Amino acid sequence: MKAAVVTDFHAPLELQELPVPEPGPGEVLVRIDYSGLCHTDIHAARGDWPVKPTPPFVPGHEGIGRIERLGAGVTARARGDRVAVAWLGYACGECRYCISGWETLCEQQENSGYSVNGTFAEYAVAPAAFATPVPETISSRDGAPLTCAGVTTYKAIKVARVAPAETVAIFGIGGLGHLALQYARIAGAFVIAVDVEEPKLEMATELGADHVVNARTSDPVAAIQALGGADVAVALAVSPASFDQAFRSLRRGGRLVCVALPPDGTMTLPIFDTVFNGKSVIGSIVGTRNDLADVFALHAAGRTRVIAVDHKLDEVNQSIDDVLSGSVLARIVFQL
Ligand code: NAD
Ligand code: ZN
Ligand code: ZN
């Protein structure tokens, strides 16, 4: 099978011909149809984070495809089922996190495209229980970005407990941000979209943002405070400075949700401001299988729009450069 492989953190990905993996007991073999390119795949390929994957590996965790083979003992999925292969590739199901609805915090978890091979390939294996069913009314092309960008930002809006008529500022209108703003609207919030690229702000307006702010040409903190401040700010830009701006754009009682993972990112919090103004800082990592089912249900009901552009897997290195240059409107998807 064709796959894009990270062989070295300092080298481009290599297109390789690999053997089709064997589904082990409890696993399924998925013929990948579409895979999205998440900014996390770029961090993975470059070894950006403190916990690193081990090359060689296949990145990708926004994979949609049909089950072609079942490993021993699989009864909950059938051949031909269309499923999503997401970042949460496995969780133990028994620890305090798993049994309390926080499987995304499981210490035994595996991550697709990071600790195990992912979806930048014609085939991937996944535990049957973690191959989330995709409603037939959702195209694989739309399903791919929903599988990480969608579930992650749906969860970010949920953990912030966004209420109707609150103001949500979204920092970074890329793959994640274009969906975050839609979930904020579904929750009933007014939305301020912040980015440094004008075409992304135009897209945000088209998707229903109430205000847009270009952080390259103006000060987003001043602009958002002039609107009364944000009840919730969601940090999705790969820029520590933008986290600081997001925090400072909050009004009293505001919640900052940290989602982006800039390399070597640190943040300094003003204690007095945080305490006296009752602000909170929340870290949010992807979402559960149940959150993903919610995301698919919303999309199947016509409540969200996925904006994506098709690239070939052979163009993976150029695609990464395009994301880093800010020239991709929302998401690149590879058809496999
Ligand atoms: P992306 O590149 O598609 O989007 C980032 C956006 O931020 C772009 O639109 C870019 O123009 C904008 N931006 C850059 N600098 C900015 C600035 N200073 N101010 C405002 N906007 C700015 O990336 P993505 O795929 O949406 O991922 C974003 C981040 O989220 C990555 O770090 C990724 O690893 C992380 N991520 C986290 C989770 C999680 O569960 N916490 C899940 C998926 C992705
Ligand atoms: Zn992702
Ligand atoms: Zn667990």
Image (cartoon, helix red, strand yellow):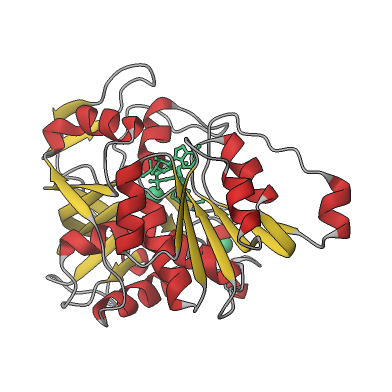
Comparing 14 with 328, the one in front is 328
Q: Farthest front residue?
A: 226
Q: Quadrant of residue 81?
A: bottom left
- Residue 225 quadrant: bottom right
Q: Quadrant of ligand 3?
A: bottom right
Residue placed at 33% from the left, 78% from the top? 298
Residue at image x 86%, y 47%?
A: 271
Label count reads 0
Look at the image and tell me whether residue 215 can be seen.
yes
Q: Position of residue 38 (x, y in %)?
A: 34, 45
The residue lying toward the viewer, choosing from 100 and 262, is: 262
Horizontal arrangement in the rendering, residue 161 relative to residue 292 (left or right) = right
Vertical position of residue 206 compared to residue 213: above or below? below
Q: Is residue 227 left or right of residue 59?
A: right
Residue at the image position 43 percent from the left and 63 percent from the top: 181
In the displayed structure image, the side of residue 256 where residue 42 appears, left or right: left
Name the one closer to the observer, 105 or 278. 278
The quadrant in which the N terminus is found is top left
Instruction: Give the image location of residue 124, x and y in percent.
Output: 23, 50
Which residue is nearer to you in this view: 335 or 253? 253
Residue 122, percent from left and from top: 14, 46
Mark yes or no: residue 87 visible. Answer: no
- Identify the residue at horizontal 25%, vertical 26% (top origin): 13
Residue at the outermost top position: 10
Where residue 329 sits: x, y (%)?
Answer: 27, 46
